[in-house]
Amino acid sequence: MKLKYILISTVLLTSLSACEDMFEPAQENIRDVEQMFSDPNYASGLLGYGYAMLPYDNSSVSDVATDDAVTNDLTSTYSQMALGSWSSSNNPMEQWQARKATIQYINTFLSIVDRVSWSSTETTNKMFIDKLSGEAYALRALNYFYLLQAHAGWTEDGQLLGVPMVFEPEDMNSDFNLPRNEFSECVKFIFEDLDRAIDLLPLDFSNISSNAELPSKYQQIGAEMGGYNLVFGTYQRGRISGRIAEAIKAQVALLAASPAYREASGVTSETAANYAAIVLNRIGGVNGIDPRGNTWYMNTDELDNMGSGSVTAEIIWRGNRTNGDADWDMGITQEKNNFPPTLYGSGRINPTQNLVDAFPMANGYPISDAVNSGYDASNPYVNRDPRLTDYVLYNGSTYKGKTIITGLYADSENKTDDGLNKIGTSTRTGYYLRKLLREDCNPNPSALNPKYHFPVRIRYTEIFLAYAEAANDAWGPTATGGNAYSAYDVVKALRSRGGVGTDNGDAYLESIKNDVAKMTDLIRNERRIELCFENKRFWDIRRWNLPLNETAKGVRIEQGSNGLNYTEIDVEIRNYQDYMYHGPIPYSETLKWSNLQQNKGWR
C-alpha cells in the first residue's frame, strides 16, 4: 500500500536523531497507520514533512531569469530557461511534484489528527488538535498557492484552470486521473483552508500569565494556563501562526486579483486590498512600517540578538538561523557565491542596467525625466536613490573597506578581477549583488568568521506593497476604501524610509498622486526595487502581463581623455514565448493522466 511506504519514510525522517543502531533498523520502523494514534511523535512526522518541504528558497535564484539580473554561472537552469530551453519537461520553476507530495502528507495528517493521543490531559489534547490542525490547513493552503502560481493558466478551450484539488489522502484505490479545478475554485478552497487555520491558531505564539487570559473557548472546557502555554506558548514560535496565515491569504488574493487572473478568479482588487489591510492594521498601518525594514539583512544588531523563533519589526515569518560560512542548506554561502572575486567570492548574481535604471534620483524623479531629475549620464551613480547603494555594488562602490572597480581601466593600478568579464567569476553586467549579504562575513579561506543568516519568508514591506497595488486599482491613489491609509500613503512612507524625496516633499509623487495609471507604474517600480533579488520579480512580471523578453543589459566603463565613458551593452537576449505567461503542467503528468489538460501553447 503506497501510504504505508510514505509513512515508513516519515518515521525514518523523524528518527534520525535517535540513538538506535542505524544499521539494524528496529521493527517499529515498519508500522501501520493505526499505531500513530498512540504515538504522537510518529504522527507529528507527517506535519513535520510539511515544514521540511516549505516552498521557499533560502537565497536568490529566479531573478537571473528576469530583467533584474543575470548570472556568471553558465550552468544555471534559470539562465538557460530564460535563453530558450524552458519546456514542460525541463522546468526550473516546477512545483508540481514537491507540492503534491507535501499535500499528500498533510492530508494524511488531517485524517488522523483528532484520533491521536497528543496529551493525557483532555483539555490539553483538545488544544493540540486545534493547533496542529490549524497548522496543517495553513500548510496545505500554502502548497496549493505555490502550485497555482507555477502551474495555473489558460487552456486551449479558453478556461482559466488551476490544479486538481485533493483533500483526502490518496492510496492505491484512489482515482489519480483527475481534471484540474477552475482557478476560481482553487482560490476559494485555499481561502477556506486559511480561514480554518486563522480560526484555530493564535495570532502569535506567546505565553499567558493567568487562566483569565485563556481564550473563552478554552476557558469553557476548563483548560489551564500551563497546558495553554505548552501548546500555544513561545516555544512554538517559528511555526505557522494566525498572523502568518493572514499574510499568506493577502498574497493569494493579490495573485488572483492581478491582470493575468482577475478575469476569471472571482477575486477583486478591493478584496485583495482589504486582506492586506487586516495584516497591516495589526501593526498600526503605515505608522507600523519598520524604519529600517528595507535593510533588514544588514541590521546585524537585530539579527544577532533574535531569540529562538522571534522576529524583528520587519519580518512576519522567517526560517531557522543558518551559518553564514557553513550553510549546509545552500551548500555554499551567499557571501561566497556573490561577493566580488577580490573579496573571495564568485560574483554569481549580476544586477542588470535595467534594474539600476529603475532606481530614481534621490529627489524622487525617475532618471528618464531630464528636466527635473538632475541625472547625469556621465556620473550616473551620484545623487541616486540611496537604496541603489544598499542593494547593488557598482563601479567605485566602497564595500568592506575596499573600492570595487568593475570598469576596464588602462592603468594597471585599477585592473582587478572585479572588472567586466575579466575572469569566470567576474561580473557580466558591470554590477555585483550587495542586498542579502552580510558585510561582516569574510569568505577568505584563511580567515573564516561565521555569521548567521535568517531566511525571510514573508516581510511586512511585501504586504504594504500588496495593499498599495490593490488599493490603487480598487479605489485610486488617495482613497482609502474605509481603511485608514491609501496607496499614496504607503508609497510615500516607503520611499521616505528609503531616503527618496525627503528634501523636496517627494515632488514627483505629488505630481502623479491623482493619476491611477502613473501610480500603478510607480507602485510596480517600488515593488521591483524593494523586493529585488527575493524571488518575486519573475512572478510579478507574469501576473502583470509585462514583457518577459526584455534584453538584460549591462554597462561597459572605460577610461577616456575626459574621464570615464559609460556604454550600455546587451548581456543576454531573452527568449520567452507569449504562452509562457503561464507555466506548464509537467509533460510526464499529461502523458499519464488523460483528464489533465495542458496550458495553452505548452506540449
Image (cartoon, rainbow, N blue to C red):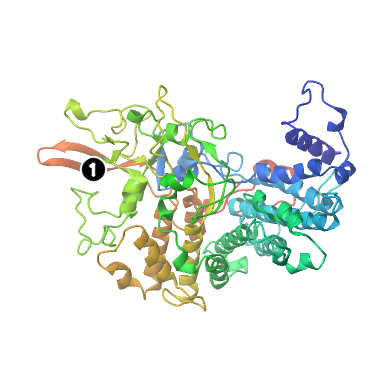
Residue 592 image offset from top left, x and y in percent: 74, 43
Residue 481 image offset from top left, x and y in percent: 51, 77
Kindly tell me whether residue 136 is visible in this rendering. Answer: no
- Looking at the picture, does residue 463 appear above or below residue 353? below
Which residue is rendered at x = 72% and y = 61% of the image? 200
Which residue is rendered at x = 21% and y = 43% of the image? 566
Q: Nearer the viewer, residue 511 or 37?
A: 37
Toward the front, the furthest residue is 210
Residue bearing the label numbered 1:
567
Specify whether 27 is left or right of 242.
right
- Location of the C terminus (image quadrant): top right
- Looking at the picture, does residue 503 appear above or below residue 300? below
Residue 131 image offset from top left, x and y in percent: 73, 56
- Location of the N terminus (image quadrant): top right
Which residue is rendered at x = 39% and y = 26% of the image? 444
Q: Quadrant of residue 505?
A: bottom left
Kindly tell me whether residue 278 is visible in this rendering. Answer: yes
Specify whether 262 is left or right of 205.
left
Q: Nearer the viewer, residue 350 or 183?
A: 350
| Circle 1 SS class | strand
Query: What's the amino acid at mark 1?
Result: Thr
Residue 410 image offset from top left, x and y in percent: 17, 29
- Looking at the picture, does residue 583 appear above or below residue 449? below
